[in-house]
Image (cartoon, rainbow, N blue to C red):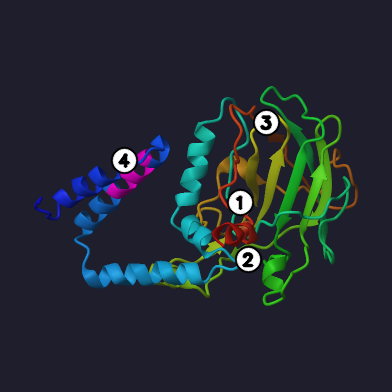
Amino acid sequence: MRAIDHNTITDAALEQMSSTPDPRLKQIMESLVKHLHEFAREVDLTPDEWIQGIGFLTAVGQKCTPFRQEFILLSDTLGFSALINALHDKRAVEASTKSSLLGPFYREGSPEMKLGDCIVQSPRQQVVIYGQVTDADGKGVPNASVEIWQTDEDGAYDLQKQDGVEIPSMDMRGHFHADAEGKYYLRTVIPLGYMIPMDGPVGDMIRAQKRHGYRPSHIHFMIGAPGYRELATALYTAGDDHLESDTVFGVTDSLVIQVNKDDPNAPIKGMPSIHYDFQLAHAAKLGSGRVGADPSQITKTGA
Ligand SMILES: [Fe+2]
């Protein structure tokens, strides 16, 4: 028999898990256990606090549905998703547009659209977004896939506007393909920043920490092409009050966009425009660039 105490328990757990055949799983679990044990020792965690934590994580799981992902929201609000993005960008083999959060509102299979189409069913003030998808040398990536999704002018995603509807319809989302030179343009509206969903356990945590819970106005993009690293990112509107204090830490300087009232190069005249070129890095190996997922895919995996 070994004597288990608050220190030797860590080696005992690591020793028992040392039979794990998958080397990456072994590495991740060993490190997780070491840090988890160290965390408990550092804060001298009590049984009451431990069960409170279990209750919190249980509530986070219970809040998840095919249309809502409270665990991704938790990861986002802890800065964990932004950290995973930063590590992902660090692994890129060449210069590329920075990643940002995919978030909990991405949906697979958004409507296929033609260049110049508007992704919003009932727009108030339209804006044209245009630019080019290029490689690290600035050369256009022909036919690059450009997926976009965002909130409306009042700060709500389609999923939130149809809360309780069994199969919500798609709005403020679209899937485009750039032209032979990698150029794209589309119409949308300027989204309003929004408060993250506050009616669940993550909202309770945000209130307990006296944080405001807001995200600045942003437009999500997923850009890809065969042979390139998938880019999940978002563009943030200059001038928003919450650029410096985004609740999920998604903003970085190079992703902030200006709305131009009078750009002679805009492909559609008579409306404000935003110009942004996306740069893709070649893929060192296959794999997703998504920190986030369509909630319905996660519940499917977990079933
Ligand atoms: Fe978002």
- C-alpha gap between disc 1 and disc 4: 36 Å
Residue 45 colored in magenta in the image: no
- Span highlighted in magenta in the image: 26-33
Between discs 1 and 3, the one toward the N terminus: 1
- C-alpha gap between disc 2 and disc 4: 36 Å
Is 99 or 153 nearer to us in this picture? 99
Between discs 1 and 4, the one toward the N terminus: 4
Whether residue 87 is visible: yes
Dot in front, 4 or 3: 4
Between discs 2 and 4, the one toward the N terminus: 4
Residue at horizontal 58 percent and vertical 56 percent from the top: 301
- The 10 Å Cα crowd at callout 4, few under 14, some 14 to 19, many 20 or more, is few
- The 10 Å Cα crowd at callout 2, few under 14, some 14 to 19, many 20 or more, is some
Q: x, y percentage for residue 96?
A: 62, 32
Residue on which disc 3 sits = 228
At label 3, which amino acid type do we have? Tyr
Residue at horizontal 48 percent and vertical 67 percent from the top: 61
At label 1, which amino acid type do we have? Leu
Residue at horizontal 67 percent and vertical 70 percent from the top: 160
Residue on which disc 2 sits = 66
Dot in front, 2 or 4: 4
- The 10 Å Cα crowd at callout 1, few under 14, some 14 to 19, many 20 or more, is many
Residue furthest toward the top? 137
Residue on which disc 1 sits = 102
Q: Which of the numbered marks, if any, corresponds to residue 19?
A: 4
Asked if disc 3 is less than 8 Å from ligand 1, the answer is no
